[in-house]
Image (tube, rainbow, N blue to C red):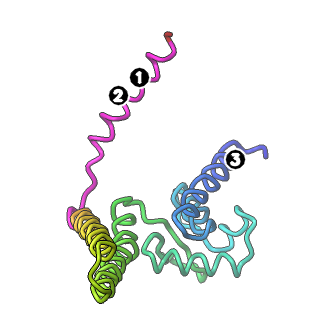
């Protein structure tokens, strides 16, 4: 590959694809979004497919899914008949949508199932084992409540405060540097 920017684009696309795949999404979603994000102008599906060596069907399916998640959008170019796409660039907007639609739903589902489990356990004959199991299930349910409250707070805050993470990174860098001296 002779073009350093093209190489950097593909390396970035693969890296973000791996992250997205780790979160349970298809790797192609991260790869396509990254190509759109790094571009200065909207791209056609054919251009994206060519850059990532993806079939037109795979690109079309991926674009539709990216649009459903609100991380890419179709844009119109005057005088063009083709569809063009650009990436959402607001990280907070993207992450809060995923948290709102996916993780929050999971937390609610876990809470409901744990409450059901506690009710079922209460039907068992009274015993130390039943008391223990019900207590532990209630602890899990309380933790699920906290998790749901944290997710709700995160979603409603409408901003991400990464300042604390910056302080942690400074401490980690200092510790890493101190380790080299010894």
Q: Position of residue 118 (x, y in %)?
A: 29, 81
Q: Could you tell me which secondary element the residue under label 3 belongs to?
A: helix
Residue 127 picture location, percent across and down: 29, 77
Q: Is residue 50 magenta?
A: no
The answer to whether marks 1 and 2 mark residues whose Cβ atoms lie closer than 8 Å is yes
Q: Quadrant for residue 81, please give it.
A: bottom right
Helix, strand or loop under label 2: helix
**Residue 172 counted in the magenta span:** yes
Quadrant position of residue 2 = top right
Magenta region, main secondary structure = helix
> Which is more toward the observer, 157 or 118?
118
In the drawing, what numbered circle is on residue 171? 2
C-alpha distance separating marks 1 and 2: 6 Å
What is the crowding at mark 3: few (fewer than 14 residues within 10 Å), some, or many (at least 20)? few
Q: Which residue is mark 1?
A: 175
Dot placed on the residue nearer the N-terminal end, 2 or 3? 3
Give the magenta part as a residue range. Answer: 155-180
Residue under pointer 3: 7
User: In the drawing, does residue 141 fall left or right of residue 39?
Assistant: left
Answer with mark 3 or mark 1, whichever residue precedes in sequence.
Answer: 3
């Amino acid at each position: 590959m002779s073009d350093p920017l093209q190489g950097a684009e593909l390396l970035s696309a693969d890296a973000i694809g791996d992250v997205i795949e780790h979160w349970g999404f298809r790797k192609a979603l991260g790869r396509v979004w990254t190509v759109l994000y790094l571009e200065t102008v909207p791209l056609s599906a054919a251009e994206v497919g060519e850059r990532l060596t993806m079939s037109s069907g795979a690109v079309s399916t991926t674009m539709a899914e990216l649009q459903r998640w609100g991380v890419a959008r179709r844009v119109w170019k005057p005088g063009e008949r083709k569809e063009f796409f650009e990436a959402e660039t607001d990280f907070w907007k993207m992450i809060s949508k995923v948290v709102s639609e996916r993780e929050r739903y999971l937390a609610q589902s876990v809470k409901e199932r744990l409450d059901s489990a506690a009710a079922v356990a209460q039907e068992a004959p009274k015993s130390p084992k039943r008391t223990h199991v019900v207590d532990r299930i209630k602890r899990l349910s309380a933790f699920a409540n906290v998790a749901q409250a944290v997710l709700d707070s995160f979603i409603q805050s409408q901003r991400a405060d990464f300042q604390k993470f910056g302080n942690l990174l400074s401490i980690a860098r200092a510790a890493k540097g101190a380790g080299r001296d010894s």
